[in-house]
Image (cartoon, rainbow, N blue to C red):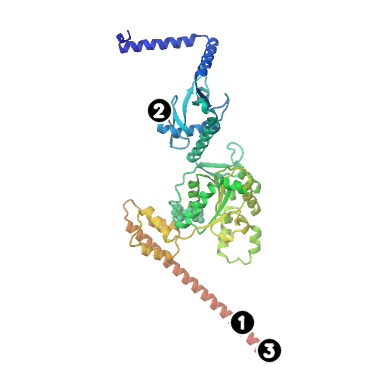
């Protein structure tokens, strides 16, 4: 009989059966349909050896926040589904141009845990009531359903679900968009925007690979950071807060800020760039601290210029009248118009950071003049590791040559090495001279430019040293002359006294 149907007739027949079922559903009284459905499900579950767990996207009808469990499961399944599922949904992440693939509706993936097979499915339910809403989720409700054999009930509930959540969370951390926070002036803390920190997406390209410095020193810093980031249990065991302080010091242009970006990229932390001069007083500083979160680096750049160490400065004023460094700091401080934050306020801030909410934090200070800082500020326990970033050495130059010119050796390297030993040039200047100025510029002319710049710098240093020497000699001569004059006067006076 069936074979006598053509394909077209077959489709028509099936279509009419489907239509009849739909009409039956639509007109059959709901009060009768629900108990029938419930009864059918109950009898089915009696014979059905599997258990199901549903994880809804929003818990409760009026929940505005997406369930964290759902989000973690979603991340976990996304990682699995890109390899397994045939139908995926592509979404663009917020503030970003990355594409994230998620399981499409009704799509399934299988997972295995300690030899147990688990089936996951993504479901979308659309209620048939007609409503207009601002929240699309009210129309569409998504959930994940996991199915497994009931023999494994305990292991799935006690172990597997925890494993999924942990994995999901760690993928979220790995893939999350990191942020760079900058503190707002307190005038803007309230009102429309109501925020102590403004943020942008943190996308600095610096990494430890691109940071040119002595490889041994670099590896030591990387190891220190990695040990810190994995030491949750250790810190808990010894009863220390899971925090670490770094002081980066060295002349301008030696890569202090670049290293902070590399640290954040390595550990995948957010950065809180704290501008102390925009903070009115110690109380505000404390409030800002409370508004930061874990997995972050709190940075205070140019700490020497941001803080009014009045007490100390007044005491030292006499001895430092001719100190050009101090003059420069004072000038910078005046330009920035100081806040009322005091040294003790800052010390409390750091200690507070150590003991307050959130863990896994790093604090970094940068300065051009380490010696000018109050020892209390940088003692171990506050600043655990002091890192000096200095003028460009040969190893750092080699890293730049690899990065910009893709070479490991060249005849001119000998000259560069000698010149770098004889003169001081910051990595920023070496990079600027070595970088090809156009697409076609050849390696030799880039190296030549650097050699020339180094020679000029050497000449300049020599000239300055000679000038300084000349100045010293002149000063000596002047002093000697004055001393001679005084002696002469004394002698003359002595003769007069004798004559009288
Ligand atoms: N060691 C380095 N490796 C790679 N690039 C560097 C290094 N040092 C400096 N640079 C380059 O030089 C520029 C200036 O560096 P950076 O801002 O990190 O210096 P800084 O030490 O923070 O200076 P300042 O004390 O003035 O703040 C950056 O654009 C960076 O790319
Ligand atoms: Mg800097």
CA gap, disc 2 and disc 3: 114 Å
Residue that mark 2 sits on: 87
Query: Of 391 and 111, which appears nearest the observer?
Result: 111
- Which residue of the protein is positioned furthest toward the top in this rendering? 1
Q: Return the disc, 1 or 3, that comes first in the chain's sequence.
A: 1
Q: The C terminus appears in which quarter of the rendering? A: bottom right
Left or right: residue 279 versus residue 93 is right
Question: Looking at the rendering, which quadrant does residue 8 occupy?
Answer: top left
Q: Are marks 1 and 3 in contact (CB under 8 Å)?
A: no
In the rendered view, would you say 146 is above or below 24?
below
Q: Name the N-terminal-most of marks 2 and 1.
A: 2
Measured Cα–Cα span from mark 1 to mark 3: 16 Å
Disc 2 crowd rating (10 Å Cα; few below 14, some 14-19, many 20+) is some
139, 425: nearer the viewer: 139
Q: Which circle, 2 or 1, is nearer the viewer?
A: 2
Q: Is mark 2 on a helix, strand or loop?
A: loop
Tell me if residue 41 comes above or below residue 200 in the rendering: above
Q: Is mark 3 within 8 Å of ligand 1?
A: no
- Which residue is pictured at 42% across the width and 63% down the height? 420
User: Residue 7 — which label?
Assistant: none
Residue 497 marker: 3
Please state the horizontal and vertical placement of residue 364, each as a whole percent of the image. 55, 51
Residue that label 1 marks: 486
Task: Give percent across and percent down for residue 216.
Answer: 46, 57
Q: In which quarter of the image is the N terminus?
A: top left
- Which mark lies nearer to you, 2 or 3? 2
User: Residue at left 48%, top 23%?
Assistant: 124
């Amino acid at each position: 009989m069936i074979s006598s149907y053509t394909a077209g007739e077959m489709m028509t027949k099936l279509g009419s059966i489907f239509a009849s079922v739909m009409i039956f559903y639509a007109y059959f009284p709901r009060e009768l349909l629900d108990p029938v459905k419930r009864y059918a499900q109950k009898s089915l579950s009696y014979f059905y050896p599997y258990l199901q767990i549903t994880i809804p996207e929003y818990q409760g009808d009026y929940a505005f926040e997406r369930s964290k469990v759902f989000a973690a499961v979603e991340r976990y399944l996304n990682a699995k589904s890109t390899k397994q599922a045939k139908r995926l949904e592509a979404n663009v992440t917020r503030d970003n141009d990355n594409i994230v693939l998620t399981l499409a509706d009704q799509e399934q993936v299988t997972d295995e845990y300690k030899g147990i097979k688990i089936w996951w499915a993504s479901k979308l339910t659309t209620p048939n009531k007609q409503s207009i809403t601002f929240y699309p989720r009210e129309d569409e409700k998504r959930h994940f359903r996991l199915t497994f054999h009931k023999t494994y009930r305990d292991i799935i509930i006690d172990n597997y679900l925890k494993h999924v959540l942990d994995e999901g969370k760690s993928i979220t951390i790995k893939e999350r968009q990191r942020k760079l926070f900058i503190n707002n002036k307190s005038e803007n803390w309230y009102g429309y925007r109501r925020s102590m920190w403004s943020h942008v997406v943190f996308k600095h390209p610096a990494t430890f690979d691109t940071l040119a410095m002595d490889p041994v020193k670099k590896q030591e810093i990387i190891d220190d950071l990695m040990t810190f980031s994995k030491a949750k249990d250790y810190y808990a065991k010894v009863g220390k807060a899971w925090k670490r302080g770094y002081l980066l010091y060295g002349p301008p242009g030696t890569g202090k800020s670049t290293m902070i970006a590399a640290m954040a990229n390595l550990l995948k932390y957010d950065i809180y760039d704290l501008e102390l001069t925009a903070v009115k007083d110690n109380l505000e500083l404390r409030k800002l601290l409370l508004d930061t979160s874990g997995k972050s680096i709190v940075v205070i750049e140019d700490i020497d210029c941001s803080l009014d160490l009045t007490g100390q400065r007044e005491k030292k004023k006499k001895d430092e009248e001719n100190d050009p460094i101090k003059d420069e700091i004072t000038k910078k401080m005046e330009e920035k118009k100081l806040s009322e934050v005091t040294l003790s306020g800052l010390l409390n801030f750091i200690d507070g950071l150590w003991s307050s909410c959130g863990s896994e934090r790093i604090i970094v200070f940068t300065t051009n003049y380490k010696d000018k800082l109050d020892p209390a500020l940088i003692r171990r326990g506050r600043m655990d590791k002091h890192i000096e970033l200095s003028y460009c050495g040969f190893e750092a130059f080699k890293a730049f040559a690899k990065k910009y010119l893709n070479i490991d050796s060249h005849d001119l390297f000998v000259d560069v090495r000698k010149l770098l030993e004889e003169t001081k040039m910051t990595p920023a200047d070496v990079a600027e001279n070595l970088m090809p100025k156009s697409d076609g510029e050849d390696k030799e002319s880039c190296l030549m430019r650097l050699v020339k710049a180094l020679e000029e710098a050497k000449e300049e240093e020599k000239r300055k040293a000679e000038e300084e020497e000349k100045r010293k000699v002149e000063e000596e001569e002047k002093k000697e002359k004055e001393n001679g004059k005084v002696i002469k006067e004394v002698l003359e006076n002595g003769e007069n006294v004798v004559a009288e």
